Amino acid sequence: MNKIWKVLDPAPQSFFQEHPELPPLVANLLYHRNLRTQEQIDEFLNPDYLQDIHSPFLFKHMEKACKRILKSINKQEKIVVHGDYDADGVSSSIILVSVLKKLGAEHVDVFLPHREIDGYGLNKFTIQMLAEQKTNLIITCDCGISNGPEVKLAKDAGIDVIITDHHTVPEKLPPAYAIIHTLVPGEPYPDKGLAGGGVAFKLMQGLLKKHHETNETLPDGETHEAYEKWFLDMVAIASVADMVPLLGESRTLTKYGLIVLNKTKRIGLQKLLLEARLLTEDGTKKREFDSYTIGFQIAPRINAAGRMNHANAAYNLLMTENPEEASQLAHELDESNQERQKMTEELVKRAIEQIEPAQINDPVLIVYGDNWPPGIIGLISGKIKDKYNKPTIALTKNEGEMVGSGRSIEGFSLIGFLQSVPEFFTKFGGHPMACGFSLKDAEMLPELKKKMIEKFLIDTAGMDVSPKLDIDADIELDKIDWDLYDLLSKFEPFGQNNEKPKYLTHNLVVQTVEPVGKEGKHIRIMASNGAKCVKKFVGWNLCNGNNGSNWCKNLVKGDKIDVVFEISVNEWNGNRELQLTICDIVKNLG
């Protein structure tokens, strides 16, 4: 679908005058990201771990939670960390299980739900099983806030529940012993955008601080500060993978987490990076690990475990200290990821067949497959949403129940819709842009779609929901150099609410066009602005006919094009070159 290009207005002159020390390019990028005050700018450009990380005890339940956990450790009670099956949930679980064991807990287990058997979050069967196992304390991470009945069941069974989560808060809170969640009404904690891994890390910090009050070091002699910082790689993976806004404290945690990731001692992570061909056999990095590394290399492999089999494989990989086990698990995750990619591609084709032409004019889309793996339906809905720019729900049957996963567009909250029609579901949760649910009855599906269309039309009345592409600036081709790249590097790590800057250049003359990749799906274009400057552009999946376009066939030498692109670096065999990655392209026909 063609996007509407919008070059953002430059910052007002007053902003440049207030910040004369900033290069105009940097000032404009900060202004576009709504970073206007000196405090915001300083925190963004120069994040400081000591100054910009908030005290965990700003959470109103942190003191209570830490006291209960330390009491449980001292009494050697049975503690279960209940996580989730995605990269955020796995990372969160690793953080909490690790600190509990470090502080002396001898009876601590982890429970990661099976996507198809257990579903998202707590369920009554899990609670009953944990009660039978004489569990005293459940600590959730990246889940739990929507599980009121299950938390009550645990409480009635004599199990205390401490919730750490970041998902949308229901009207009625679960009757938990303590809730660590930035979005709970009345919660004073200042940073509202932490991922599940970030919230778990704050609980780790709280526990370490309480322990440090009466102990100079940890039981094995390691300092509390040093131990804490080695888990920032898990926070970075959680934050990037779950696409939380990389601003404020989340940005600082991710920035330092990338530093830890680049020198990680975690043997499983090393083996995973080796499988992704980002490390050589002798452990040498082929390039610096960044947010792109997490988003497109690490997180998909971790998520593949929960999508294709069980998240325990990813958890065990990142927890093991055995090199042989790590190698085997990393290889399994890599194979699962490849299988996931192939399966998703095939099922998206089937979903498109359901849409064209039957639903092509509908404002929202619903696709269904009897035997689609539940772990894949979120990916299907996401790709369909991207293709048609419409809120999309993909459904399948699982254990006799119809389950769905949705992805939305700006202006329409999926979780808001689900909360408006709870009578349709046995279970649901999520964010404005993504949701998951179990439908009470398959016969309700047509009515669900009708309600969704009604809600969408009301919520978006008067809005232009056409896909838009915000562009930071027009730029001449010959202005793109290493100095510009160095300025842009100050904005790393890139992610939600801090995307890579996008630039627009006009009337380029195509010099060469060639498909690249094993199947020729991608494109490489050499283009010039007249005779002065020639640059190389690459575009992913621009030659596979998506959206009806195959740019490898549509372009020939001499054509004139306008291109929106991002600036990055391509590194191979010790060489580095600037790479211009195409975000969108149009052919000038005049």
Image: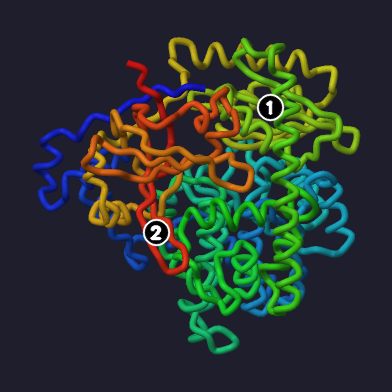
Q: Examine the rendering and report whether any part of residue 192 can be seen.
A: no
The disc labelled 2 sits on which kind of residue?
Thr
Determine the image quadrant of residue 329.
bottom right
The residue that appears at 66% across and 31% down in the rendered structure is 381
Residue 31, x across and y down, in percent: 25, 39
The answer to whether residue 59 is above or below residue 24 is below
Lower position in the chain sequence, tag 2 or tag 1: 2
Q: Is residue 480 above or below residue 544?
A: below
Instruction: Return the mark for residue 393.
Output: 1
At 80% from the left and 40% from the top, the residue drawn is: 373
Report x, y in % for residue 257: 47, 64
> Which residue ends up furthest to the front in the rendered image?
557
Q: Is residue 360 left or right of residue 286?
A: right
Q: Residue at x 29, y 53 (%)?
A: 485
Decide if residue 339 is in sight here. Answer: yes
Q: Nearer the viewer, residue 480 or 347?
A: 480
Q: Residues within 10 Å of mark 1 (few under 14, many from 20)?
A: many
Position of residue 466 in the picture relative to residue 319 (left or right) = left
The percent position of residue 61, horizontal first and vertical second, equals 54, 55
Marks 2 & 1, CB-CB < 8 Å contact: no
State the separation of the CA atoms marked 2 and 1: 34 Å
Mark 2 crowdedness (10 Å alpha carbons): few <14, some 14-19, many ≥20: many
Front-most of 416 and 355? 355
Q: Which residue is mark 2?
A: 252
Q: Is residue 107 above or below residue 94?
A: below
Closer-to-camera residue (581/26)? 581
Give x and y (percent) for residue 392. Answer: 64, 25
Quarter of the image with the C terminus in it: top left
Q: Which amino acid is tagged 1? A: Ile
- Identify the mark at residue 576; answer none if there is no mark: none
Q: Secondary structure at mark 1?
A: strand
